């Protein structure tokens, strides 16, 4: 081995070791655990793909996947809402800096704090229902009814996290060539023309990036909110795979089965990450 | 150099002599348990010079996950605390036989497989209905005469509903605990001893007439307007109990030990303003000595010895100390627990409500049905009960879903 290669390996070694110990090894361990019937006290016997077979028939898992699909279906809102606000702020609406700071503010709150705030607001006798009552609308049990619980969770998570997407869009907007916008304005383009024909095409890579990052975010970081706001209920209406993993592991004492759900979630995430890399490569080629 | 060598040897010697025992729990950081833990530690360390006991408090909601991981990797604590019933039973395989040490303690069935006792109970736990005497009086009811039959309870709730000041029962079912408490409270009087045993084994199905009648009663009481709207978004611990203490519920199904019990309600609302009764049930078949309803009662929490621990004999001694009347007397006084050890002096615990309840622990004790169900069944009950309260499922469908989980849990 040449001295250069040795030096290169020496520099690479620390991160390779860390990745192997903290990323690869747990993954392999988890995959191996998912093939056992581990029950907490004993390491568990090898049962092949039995856990995965059981997953296919588990109504709770099925519900968690259909909830996930519903969640992903709301993705356009998660992207368009901050995009629209970012464009308005970038166009220089009065008080833009104030809005930027205010929108970003919830992003620095932990999900438990956000959950506690909205628990108070959304409960049956909470402030939201009190306000609705003032205008003559009958109160709704936002978190206790299967029809509204997941949508309430989505709304709260959107409120808590769209500030980050907004900042990314603002950063992206600053790269949109100003001369093009000015030229279009001189040609008589209106705001909607600017948005549709210049800003959105220029922002395409950013929009795709936000879409992928948001998808991963909503699939893996809703736990805190679910835990505080609904505990997965009513029924299984707000149970997402990550909450189910916790339930099977902690409450039902089935690490093997929980590991199988984790592997499915991991595969889902890996698919999305793959899509993300593809999208970014495609844009790099443009 | 010679001195250094000698000093090192001496140091090694002393470390070899010093022994450490580790205890896991979710209680030792609780101020109400501090004096109990301190008393047990002092007593044990005084009796065993050179031995140090370390109490490690784990987060409550992660407790069994952490314990399971530690036990399966062989690095578990010497002694650990657990809840009686399903949680304890799931860990019998990791525990030593404490039958010889358990003589005279109450609440043993939740910590034993019938032949061998695997952990020593510290507290006993149970459910009674606590009621707000003022709300009873306001509704024209006699606060000195709480209901003893289902029909009387229905009348009480009708009167309270007619008054309109508060719902008849404060109800929190966000985590499904409201339903859990309701099921056990009714099962205490609606099931025979044999049926309770069959239910624990998974042989009495949720779709059996008895269990369906309990689920139906849950739906009926909802339909009769016994609970406030929004029970599914109200946490039992502690939103429901705070509602009760604020006077926003005339009754609540509460506990006998630890929290949400006679001491907490008495401290907050005034001991003279609350009372307790055993939850009546429709079609009761098992009745107490006084002809009234039964009260679900079970071993609350208990300590067991890890079979794989380094010094099982020493750990067994420690568990004996933890279950001893001396330290537990402090726990009873500070936290208002009902001790599983009958030798504990409870004369310092004076409360008119406790005076009412204490005799029932012997004259009206029934198994706590839900504590004998599997963890998976309870989770399914939580989910189905929320759908039942929302009117999103029927009793038949809920029972069928529970049957499926019950069959699976008891098959494997």
Image (cartoon, coloured by chain):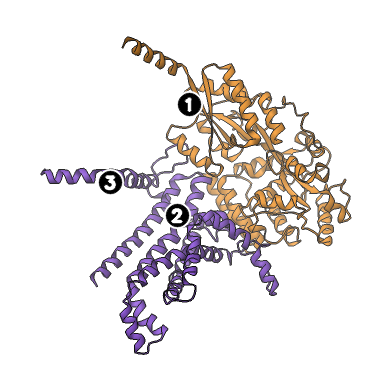
Which residue is located at x 39 percent, y 69 percent?
A170
Which residue is located at x 42 percent, y 14 percent?
B13
Q: Are marks 2 and 3 in contact (CB under 8 Å)?
A: no
Instruction: Kindly identify which chain the residue marked by label 2 belongs to.
Output: A
Report which residue position mark 1 lands on. B309
Label 1 neighbour load within 10 Å: few <14, some 14-19, many 20+? many
Q: Are marks 2 and 1 in contact (CB under 8 Å)?
A: no
Residue A234 drawn at (x, y percent):
59, 59
The purple-coloured chain is labelled A
Task: Indicate left or right for A46 with B405 as reference.
Answer: left
Please say if A14 is above or below B160.
above
Instruction: Kindly identify which chain the residue marked by label 1 belongs to.
Output: B
**Quarter assignment of residue A69:** bottom left
Can you see residue B99? no
In the picture, the disc for residue A55 is: 2
Report which residue position mark 3 lands on. A15
Mark 3 secondary-structure assignment: helix
Please say if A179 is above or below A172.
below
Disc 2 vs disc 1: which is toward the camera? 1
Residue A131 drawn at (x, y percent):
67, 69
Mark 2 secondary-structure assignment: helix
Q: CA distance from mark 2 to mark 1?
A: 36 Å
Residue A164 drawn at (x, y percent):
43, 63
């Amino acid at each position: 081995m040449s001295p250069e290669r040795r030096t290169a390996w020496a520099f690479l070694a620390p991160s390779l070791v860390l990745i192997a110990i903290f990323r690869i090894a747990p993954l392999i361990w988890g995959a191996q655990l998912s093939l056992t019937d581990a029950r907490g006290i004993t390491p568990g016997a090898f049962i092949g793909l039995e856990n995965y077979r059981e997953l296919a028939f588990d109504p709770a898992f099925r519900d968690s996947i259909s909830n996930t699909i519903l969640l992903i279906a709301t993705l356009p809102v998660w992207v368009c809402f901050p995009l629209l606000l970012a464009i308005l702020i970038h166009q220089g609406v009065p008080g833009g800096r104030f809005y930027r700071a205010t929108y970003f503010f919830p992003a620095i709150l932990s999900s438990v704090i956000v959950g506690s705030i909205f628990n108070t607001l959304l409960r049956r006798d909470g402030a939201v229902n009190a306000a609705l009552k003032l205008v003559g609308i009958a109160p709704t049990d936002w978190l206790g009814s299967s029809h509204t619980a997941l949508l309430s969770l989505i709304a709260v998570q959107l409120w808590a996290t769209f500030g980050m997407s907004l900042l990314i869009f603002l950063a992206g907007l600053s790269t949109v060539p100003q001369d093009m916008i000015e030229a279009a304005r001189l040609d008589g383009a209106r705001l909607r023309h600017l948005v549709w024909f210049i800003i959105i095409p220029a922002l395409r890579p950013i929009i795709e990036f936000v879409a992928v990052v948001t998808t991963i975010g909503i699939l893996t970081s809703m736990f805190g909110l679910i835990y505080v706001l609904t505990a997965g209920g009513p029924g299984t209406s707000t149970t997402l795979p990550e909450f189910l993993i916790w339930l099977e592991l902690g409450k039902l004492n089935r690490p093997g089965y929980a590991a199988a759900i984790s592997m499915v979630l991991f595969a889902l995430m890996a698919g999305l990450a793959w899509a993300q890399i593809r999208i970014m490569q495609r844009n790099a080629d443009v | 150099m010679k001195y250094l060598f000698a000093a090192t040897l001496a140091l090694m010697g002393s470390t070899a002599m010093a022994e450490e025992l580790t205890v896991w729990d979710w209680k030792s950081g609780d101020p109400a348990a501090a004096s109990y833990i301190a008393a047990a530690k002092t007593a044990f360390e005084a009796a065993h010079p050179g031995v140090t006991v370390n109490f490690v408090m784990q987060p409550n909601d992660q407790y069994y996950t952490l314990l399971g991981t530690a036990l399966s990797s062989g690095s578990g604590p010497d002694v650990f605390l657990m809840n009686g019933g399903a949680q304890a039973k799931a860990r019998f395989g990791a525990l030593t036989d404490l039958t010889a040490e358990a003589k005279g303690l109450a609440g043993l069935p939740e910590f034993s497989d019938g032949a061998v006792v695997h952990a020593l109970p510290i507290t006993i736990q149970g459910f009674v209905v606590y009621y707000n005497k003022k709300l009873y009086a306001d509704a024209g009811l006699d606060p000195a005469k709480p209901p003893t039959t289902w029909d009387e309870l229905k009348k009480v709730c009708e009167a309270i509903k007619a008054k309109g000041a508060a719902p008849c029962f404060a109800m929190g079912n966000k985590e499904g605990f409201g339903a859990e408490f309701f099921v056990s409270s009714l099962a205490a009087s609606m099931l025979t001893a044999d049926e309770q045993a069959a239910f624990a084994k998974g042989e009495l199905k949720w779709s059996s007439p008895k269990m369906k009648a309990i689920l139906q009663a849950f739906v009926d009481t909802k339909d009769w307007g016994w609970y406030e709207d929004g029970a599914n978004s109200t946490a039992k611990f502690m939103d429901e109990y705070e509602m009760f203490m604020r006077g926003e519920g005339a009754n609540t199904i509460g506990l006998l030990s630890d929290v949400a019990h006679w001491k907490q309600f008495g401290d907050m609302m005034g001991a003279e303003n609350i009372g307790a009764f055993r939850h009546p049930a429709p079609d009761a078949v098992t009745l107490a000595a006084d002809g009234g309803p039964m009260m679900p009662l079970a071993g609350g929490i208990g300590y067991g010895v890890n079979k794989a621990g380094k010094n099982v004999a020493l750990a067994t001694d420690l568990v004996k100390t933890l279950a001893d009347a001396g330290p537990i007397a402090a726990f009873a006084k500070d936290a208002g627990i009902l001790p599983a050890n009958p030798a504990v002096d409870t004369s310092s615990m004076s409360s008119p409500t406790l005076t009412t309840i204490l005799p029932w622990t012997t004259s009206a004790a029934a198994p706590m049905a839900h504590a004998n169900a599997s963890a998976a069944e309870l989770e399914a009950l939580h989910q189905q009960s929320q759908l039942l309260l929302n009117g999103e499922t029927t009793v038949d469908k809920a029972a069928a879903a529970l049957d499926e989980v019950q069959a699976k849990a008891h098959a494997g």
